[in-house]
Amino acid sequence: MTGVVTTLVISSVDFARMFQGKVSGAQVFKNVATTGASVAGGTGGWMGGAAAGAAFGSVVPIIGTTAGGIIGGIAGALTGGVVAQKASETILDSFIEDDAKEMLRIVEREFGEIAFAYLLTEDEANQAGDKFKDKYDVPDMLRDMYASSNRSEFARRKIEIIVENIVSKREKISLPSDEQIIIKAGEVIDELMATA
């Protein structure tokens, strides 16, 4: 019963995000299942570790059964929780894709299109990537993006703000005036006439 309550308390943030439309039901299921496995693994690890620690402590007179049980229980809980969490994540990853991965694919696609449209150099593209990570709390931004009615447009706006700032710092190139074009054209015509 304690494990169920612990899992629900830890997962309450995921449920709140689901009701706000910031994560999918599949993502919440995956997160709750992973949390539940971690809690169950930690509980089992605590029991096994405490028993092993108490047995070890009874053999070593300095430690004793009580201290051995506590030390073994903590070590077992940590180990059991981590192992159970990783195992459940590995299994669930093969069935359910994280919302974040889906959102990142959209961000990558939009970034590619914007980089092409603005003719970004490699250095400018790297700057944009760094500024994107600095400007936004990426997990929060991805959750807001998931909740958006148009995810591609959401990503495009976030990226364009950064890219436009970078390209605004490019060296300005001014076009020649009409007068300069006429003079240069005259020079070219004179050279062609001289060689003919």
Image (spheres, rainbow, N blue to C red):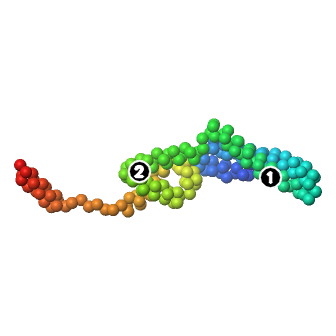
**Residue position marked by numbered label 2 in the rendering:** 115
Q: Is residue 182 left or right of residue 135?
A: left
Question: Could you say which is closer to the camera, residue 174 or residue 110?
Answer: 174
Q: Position of residue 159 (x, y in %)?
A: 46, 54
**Residue position marked by numbered label 1 in the rendering:** 75
Q: Amino acid at mark 1?
A: Ala
For disc 1, the neighbor class at 10 Å (few under 14, some 14 to 19, many from 20) is some
Q: How many marks?
A: 2
Q: Amino acid at mark 2?
A: Ala
Question: Could you say which is closer to the camera, residue 101 or residue 130?
Answer: 130
Q: Can residue 63 be spotted in the picture?
A: yes
Q: Position of residue 78 (x, y in %)?
A: 77, 51
Q: Residue at x 84, y 49 (%)?
A: 49
Q: Residue at x 37, y 49 (%)?
A: 117
Q: Residue at x 61, y 50 (%)?
A: 20
Q: Residue at x 7, y 51 (%)?
A: 195
Question: Could you say which is closer to the camera, residue 15 or residue 95?
Answer: 95
Place residue 91 in its image quadrant: top right
In space, the residues marked 1 and 2 are separated at their CA atoms by 50 Å
Name the element at disc 2.
Answer: helix
Q: Position of residue 14 (x, y in %)?
A: 66, 49
